[in-house]
Image: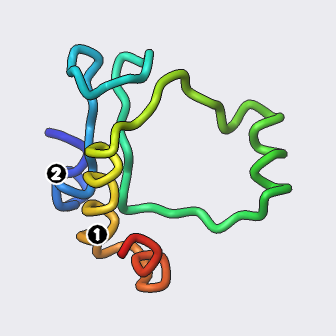
Amino acid sequence: MSLSQRFGWDINTFPVYAANQATNRFKESMTYVNCNRCYDISIADFVDLMMKGEVRLLDGSFTEEDLKLISRGVLKSTQIPREVKALFL
C-alpha cells in the first residue's frame, strides 16, 4: 500500500520519482513530493532548520514537467488552503 493510499490522498497529489526513472534528477534512491502539506515559516526559521540539518539541499533538479506535476498536485489536494493554491494558478 502506498502512502497516498494509506492517507486517502489522490495519487496525483503525491508524485514519486524512483531512482531509475529518467525524470529523477536527484541522487536519492526515491524522491517524492507531498502536495498535501505546506509549511508557513519565516526565512530565519528556514535557515535555522537548515543549520540544524532538519532541512537539507538535495543534489539534482526538477524539469519543467516535474514542476507542472507538483503544481497539479497542489491544486488537486483537499488539504491545501485556497490562498496557497492561488500561488499555483
Kind of residue sitting beneath label 2: Gln
Residue at horizontal 41 percent and vertical 85 percent from the top: 82
Q: Quadrant of the N terminus?
A: top left
Kind of residue sitting beneath label 1: Ser
Contact, mark 2 vs mark 1 (Cβ under 8 Å): no
Q: Which residue is mark 2?
A: 5
As rendered, which of 52 and 57 lies closer to the eye?
57
Q: Quadrant of the C terminus?
A: bottom left
Task: Name the residue furthest bottom.
Answer: 82
- Residue 20 bears which disc, if any? none
| Image location (x, y in percent) of residue 41 | 71, 64
As rendered, which of 72 and 63 lies closer to the eye?
63
In the picture, measured across the screen, residue 38 lies left or right of residue 10, that is right
User: To which quarter of the image does residue 3 belong?
Assistant: top left
| Image location (x, y in percent) of residue 45 | 81, 55
Rate crowding at label 2 as few (under 14), some (14 to 19) or many (20 or more) other CA atoms within 10 Å.
few
User: To which quarter of the image does residue 58 belong?
Assistant: top right
> Distance of mark 2 from mark 1, alpha carbons?
14 Å
Q: Which residue is mark 1?
A: 77
